[in-house]
Amino acid sequence: PKATPVKRTSLGRFAHENIAYAPVVAGKPIVFYSGCDSRGEYVYKFVSKAVWDPKDINGGMAAGAKYLNEGKLYVAKFNADGKGVWEELSMSNPKIVAATNFSFKTQADIAVFTRLAADAAGATKMDRPEWIDVSPVTGEVYLTLTNNRSSERPTKYPVDAANPRNYEDTITNPDGTVSTNKGNPHGHIIRWRCENKDHAASGFRWEVYGFGGGRKVGGGK
């Protein structure tokens, strides 16, 4: 039988590319990570209200829904010193209450206008956050930033420690034509380690894990 789609409103409305979850621990909440797959958008995590019960293994949608329906939503801020913080997206965050870009009245407003809430929280705009995965061995989180092919850098899309590249790249295509891209055409990978190895913690330490490169590059770095 076909499954009936269910909205997970608490996860926030944005361009979810995928959702990766941290290794589960009995008696602790489940932590889910997701990137908003657009240029200049954000990285989010969701911490479930319900704590993990091993009895739910193989329980399917009926058992898993409780971990997705209620919890706290956060957005990442990557500071230049290699430290990061998760800003809570809720009406308890004074930055959101005082927002000038939108008048947030309820948590429902935040869930629907999540990108605007992240703006108000002062999150770090990223070079198109796409896939996220979590190492089951180390607990480190890996985020791929696909690219930011834009001539509007750095005016619209800032250059900062977490998104450091701004260059012009000339590529020879298979048909012999030449394409020129500006900004961060090839993307990069960021990884972070949670504070005290606790994925529900508010702090983390991050680094650029690797930079992408193109084929037949002329002028890229």
Image (cartoon, rainbow, N blue to C red):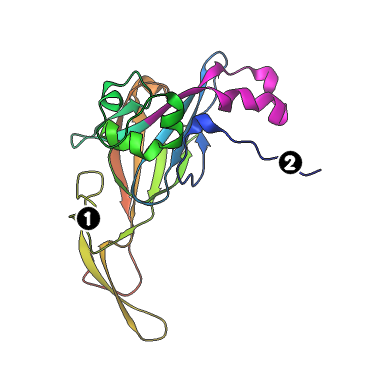
Q: Secondary structure at mark 2?
A: loop
Q: CA distance from mark 2 to mark 1?
A: 43 Å
Residue range (magenta):
48-74
Q: How many numbered marks appear?
A: 2
Which disc, if any, is residue 165?
Answer: 1
Left or right placement of residue 54 versus residue 163 in this view = right
Quadrant where the C terminus is found in the figure: bottom left
Nearer the viewer's eye, disc 2 or disc 1?
2
Q: Secondary structure at mark 1?
A: loop
Disc 1 marks a residue whose amino acid type is: Arg
Q: Which mark is residue 30?
A: none
Quadrant occupied by the N terminus: top right
Using the image as rendered, state which of residue 153 and residue 219 is in the foreground.
153
Q: 28 and 44: which one is in front? A: 44
Magenta stretch containing residue 75, yes or no? no
**Residue 210: percent from the left, percent from the top?**
32, 50
Q: Residue at x 51, y 39 (%)?
A: 19
Q: Amino acid at mark 2?
A: Ala
Q: Position of residue 175 (x, y in %)?
A: 41, 85
Q: Quadrant of residue 114?
A: top left
Position of residue 189 in the picture relative to residue 58 (left or right): left
Query: In the visual, does 58 lie left or right of 23?
Result: right
Give the labeled residue for mark 2.
Answer: 3
Whether the magenta-drawn stretch holds residue 50 is answered as: yes
Q: Residue at x 18, y 55 (%)?
A: 155
Residue 140 visible in the displayed image = no
Q: Position of residue 193 (x, y in %)?
A: 35, 31
The extreme right residue here reads: 1
Q: Residue at x 33, y 28 (%)?
A: 86
